[in-house]
Image: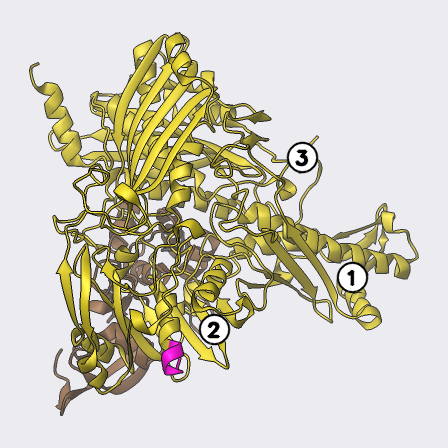
Chain colours: A brown, B yellow
Amino acid sequence: MGTAIKKGKLHVVTLTVNGEEHAVLVKANTTLLDLLREEFDYTGTKKGCELGDCGACTVLMDDRPVNSCLVLAVEADGHSFTTIEGVEQGGKLDRLQEEFINQAAVQCGYCSPGMILSGKALLMRNPHPTEREVREAIGGNLCRCTGYVRIVKAILAAAEANS
Amino acid sequence: MSEATTKEFSVIGKSVPKIDARDKVTGRAKYTGDLKVTGMLIGKILRSPHAHARILSIDTSKAEQLPGVEAVITAKDVPATFYGISPARYDETILAIEKVLQVGDKVAAVAAVDEETAVKALGLIDVEYEVLPAVLDPLRAMDEDQPQIHPQYERNISVEIHQDFGDVEMAFQQSHLVRTDRFQGNRATHVPMEPHAAISKWENGKLTIWSSTQSPHYFQYHIARVFGLKMGDVRVIKPTVGGGFGGKLEPSAAEYVSAALAMKTGRPVKIVFDRKEVFFHNRGRHAQHIELTTGVTKEGKILGVHGKYIIDGGSYTSLGIASAYYAGAMLPLIYEFDHFKFDCFRVHTNLPSCAAQRGHGAPQPRFAFESQLDMIAKELGMDPIEIRKVNARRPNTMTLNDLKVNSCEFMACLEKAREISGWVGKKGKLPPGQGIGIGCGGFITGAGYPIYRTRLPHAAAIVKVSEQGDIATLYIGAVDIGQGSDTILAQMAAEAIGINYEDMRIVSADTETTPHDFGAYASRQTLMSGHAVKQAGEEVRRQIIELAAELLEASVADLDIDRRVIFVKGSPEKMLPFETVANEFFIRKGPLMGKGSYTPPKLGGKFKGAAVGTSPAYSFAAQISQVEVDEETGQVMVTNVWDVHDCGTVINPNLLHAQVEGALFMGMGEAMYEQVVFDDKGRPLNANLGEYRVPTALDVPQVISELVDSYEPAGPWGVKEVGEGATLPTMGSYANAIYDAIGVRLYDLPLTPEKVWRAIHERKKPS
Ligand code: FES
Ligand code: FES
């Protein structure tokens, strides 16, 4: 981490996003969130606070959820990322995405990308979580619309489908 | 018998998936901040560090010279037109003209090639202020020694309301028990997860604004007025919106300033608020200081109520006059009584402006009322549900303030809530530290009158069937901000036409391509926009049936359509597919379209402020909460909430319960955690999502949302409100449950562990 090569005021960063490798020049103060949104147009990664408080900007960094507003682009060097755009595979929704739709866990949808990625990271490391574990996994993702009721249900339903 | 019980529906009443859900779970849905317009600049606003100050000078020269800066503007570069919601109280301008009235007030703005340059440029603007004493305490705002904030509002009184119905003094004299209690509400705020955002483009004398808005129509109206443009030269487009809750009902600086910068530079300008700016703009809940006096008979029948309020309006008026009236108007809704006095002062302070938030003005008074009703029940030795039943509103009644109630299943809500919560086995019987409490509410289904005076219908719709007859598109001004109006209106259109939900497409909330609608507020769209959609769909149906009758050589009266099949009733083998007839229609007569519009009937009484609270229909709800209180720490854990809602016919059960859950959740945050706090200079101390505590997934209880059978004659297919009503009961039900658990009464929101702990220690003190 932080091994990005410096070129004048810019740094060369090599990273993989949704399976695609990129080499880009970034400023030292560019966040991963801005890199994803502005440079790669992965606008599914949302900006809610830019302080690490809301989780709207959650992406997976080597399969672990991170707040991309708190990761500098230079720190992304050498790592692999999944954004919400990379969850659907070959036009087929991930089970978790399907359950978000089925359970009506989506209202305004602003938190949904981050919620789905936090949920996905949980199910990857723990395919059969308890309700408490689900709530803990999304504890850093704020949703203002749903009261979390259906989000928790959706993640549990996707886990159920794992078995 | 009601329509609801006689006909099976094909499309409505089903939990179809949200029309935009796939885009939202894949990241494809575009919110305003996600859009990029060619040549776009980034705008940023310089905001006041002072709560109240005179602007002596502004030097923008250094900022202008910074490479990459395309424009720097101050008040002298933009229209000086005052804006607001009601003409008598237009008191805000695009940029502050002479004085700033709150920390975060709008002073100057820049447009630059990127955000970093724009932020740097803000730092190069020199503003000289003469700091003035500020009004920070609403309870002192009217005092003689306080500075006056606006020249036109003496003693900082924004509005003064005195309503008097019946004879409250006589009612108190006849009462067996009269209680007076004081309650204090909190400054809660909406916190939509998507901050306010707008992109303005100025081209050939036309202003196009993509905006995170709850009402393209009101935005178009106000923006056209402020910039002196024809409404037809202002187009407001709503992309996907990340929540509103009342906070995006009027244009903010995001729209006004980006428009001014676009006009100045000739290039599109995007402004996205950062989280702090959302707190500065605010327009959230008024903190209400309420003194409530209620008189009852021995049997618990309410005879009279007197509410005296001082409410903190903050810097500008915004929608606050309506909020103040709502604070009184909704009190007589759910319980029947005849004598009511309402005295209210909305005062200005040098704090962010307050306006409409879910439940508009009504939740804090409801908290006070529901709390006091429990105290009265206790004194009378009555069960809290019993006293509510004694007073519960009945259907087809008129409130003392002339609100006409049609359907009302409040009594059934109370019964069902008692049953599903296990009340009888729990009330007074739970182990120490645990308790159960009830709170109730009721709300409008759309306001009877629009926010500004106009004779326009409240909603309108166009349905157009494709040439091949395979799909139909609904064009509607109604605004989906996440609650799901696009979905349920598409369901309604499909039902009315006789086709499937999957055949529906929707174009919504764009002032140029969709017909007028007032937008997403006051829980109005299912009923009001729904009426327009039903009419438009039925017009298509009628035309299709007429042509099919000709083709089938049958009479119109004998034909029906269901899920794309047009058939002769009784002999279903005589049928035609919808697409065949629709295609033939286009060949013979051109576009197959239907249109509809809705205007509510004339509602309300004659007194001052009578319009506020009027609505074609009202919802009712009872909520029961169960809590566990840790007496050592004052920590309250709400374990369960049962909500029973009377909301008329259900169009989409999943989305409906999701609304209840979300509304209740918002009430819960306000009840337990949320409060914007300020230092002694009027600077917000917690204008971020770390310290302004929105409940997380770990904080929320198990929620059971249930309904009672109900049919509202004023609504299409019998529908009425659901989006806001469930916010109202929560605060009272929590306070009552805490009392049941530990025997201490809390009067101030939010019900924090500190207050609980202090109240426990007060109680333990030897007296
Ligand atoms: S935007 Fe990153 S946590 Fe809120
Ligand atoms: S669905 Fe709106 S914030 Fe979660």
Q: Which mark is residue B577?
A: 1
Q: Secondary structure at mark 3?
A: helix
Question: Badge 3 sits on which subunit?
Answer: B
**What residue is shown at x 25% (from left), y 44% (from top)?**
B674
Disc nearer the start of the sequence (2/1) = 2
Q: CA distance from mark 3 to mark 2?
A: 47 Å
Residue B179 figure quarter? top left
Say which of marks 3 and 2 sits in front. Answer: 2
Residue A144 in the image, given as x and y percentages of width and height: 34, 51
Residue type marked 3: Thr
- How would you rate the neighbour count of disc 1 (Cα within 10 Å): few for under 14, some for 14-19, many for 20 or more? some
B567 over A76 or under it: above or below: above
Task: State which quarter of the image contains the N terminus of chain B.
Answer: top right
Q: Relative to residue B48, is residue B624 drawn left or right?
A: right
- Quadrant where ligand 1 appears: bottom left
Residue indicated by mark 2: B208
Residue B259 counted in the magenta span: no
Q: Is residue B381 visible?
A: no
B385 over A93 or under it: above or below: above
**What residue is shown at x 33% (from left), y 53% (from top)?**
A143
Residue B72 in the image, given as x and y percentages of width and height: 27, 77
Q: Is mark 3 within 8 Å of ligand 2?
A: no
Cβ atoms at labels 3 and 2 below 8 Å apart: no
Residue indicated by mark 3: B5
Residue type marked 1: Pro
